[in-house]
Image (cartoon, rainbow, N blue to C red):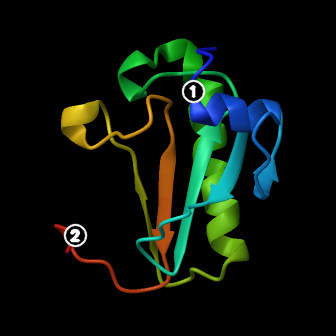
């Protein structure tokens, strides 16, 4: 774990955050700058810099990221649909070098955003 990784520090409890989900593989928090009525980050507890580092051995982690996102979407009443987004690398818009999935919903989404 890099000492300066924001999400690792949140996972360890060094930086207190209001987690909407937590288990041994992932935790989830509401985004501090939401881009939709529901905007939750689902984050692995273990440091993974980005999706580019994932391997076949990470299947359980990926399944957990998606099932936790789906559970939160149901809990938040996103019956009309929702979006999962991950950014890879600085040129792909990744601002924190720790894999995380954005769960977005609560309004009709267009593509591209904006």
Cα–Cα span, label 2 and label 1? 28 Å
> Which residue shows up at 67% across the image and 22% down it?
46
Expressed as whole percent of the image width and height from the top left, the position of residue 113 reads 22, 70
Residue 33 placement, left or right of 68: left
Kindly state the secondary structure of the residue where label 1 is placed: loop
Q: Is residue 23 visible?
A: yes
Expressed as whole percent of the image width and height from the top left, the position of residue 66 reads 58, 48
Q: Is 50 rendered above or below residue 23?
A: above
> Which residue shows up at 16% across the image and 67% down it?
112
Count of residue discs: 2
Q: Are marks 2 and 1 in contact (CB under 8 Å)?
A: no
Residue 21 placement, left or right of 35: right
Kindly state the secondary structure of the residue where label 2 is placed: loop
Expressed as whole percent of the image width and height from the top left, the position of residue 9 reads 70, 31
Expressed as whole percent of the image width and height from the top left, the position of residue 67 reads 65, 50
Sequence order check, earlier mark of 2 and 1: 1
Residue 91 placement, left or right of 3: left
For the C terminus, the quadrant is bottom left
Q: Which mark is residue 5?
A: 1
Q: Is 41 rendered above or below residue 37?
A: above
Q: Quadrant of residue 29?
A: bottom right
- Residue annotated with mark 2: 113
């Amino acid at each position: 774990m890099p000492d300066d990784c924001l999400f690792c520090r949140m996972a360890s409890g060094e930086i207190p955050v209001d987690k909407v989900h937590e288990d041994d593989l992932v935790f989830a928090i509401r985004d501090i700058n939401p881009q939709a009525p529901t905007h939750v980050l689902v984050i692995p507890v273990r440091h993974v810099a980005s999706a580019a580092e994932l391997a076949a051995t990470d299947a359980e982690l990926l399944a957990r990221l998606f099932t936790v996102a789906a559970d939160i979407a149901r809990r938040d009443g996103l019956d009309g649909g929702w979006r999962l987004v991950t950014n890879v690398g600085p040129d792909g818009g990744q601002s924190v070098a720790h894999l995380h999935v954005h769960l977005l919903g609560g309004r009709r989404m267009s593509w591209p955003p904006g």
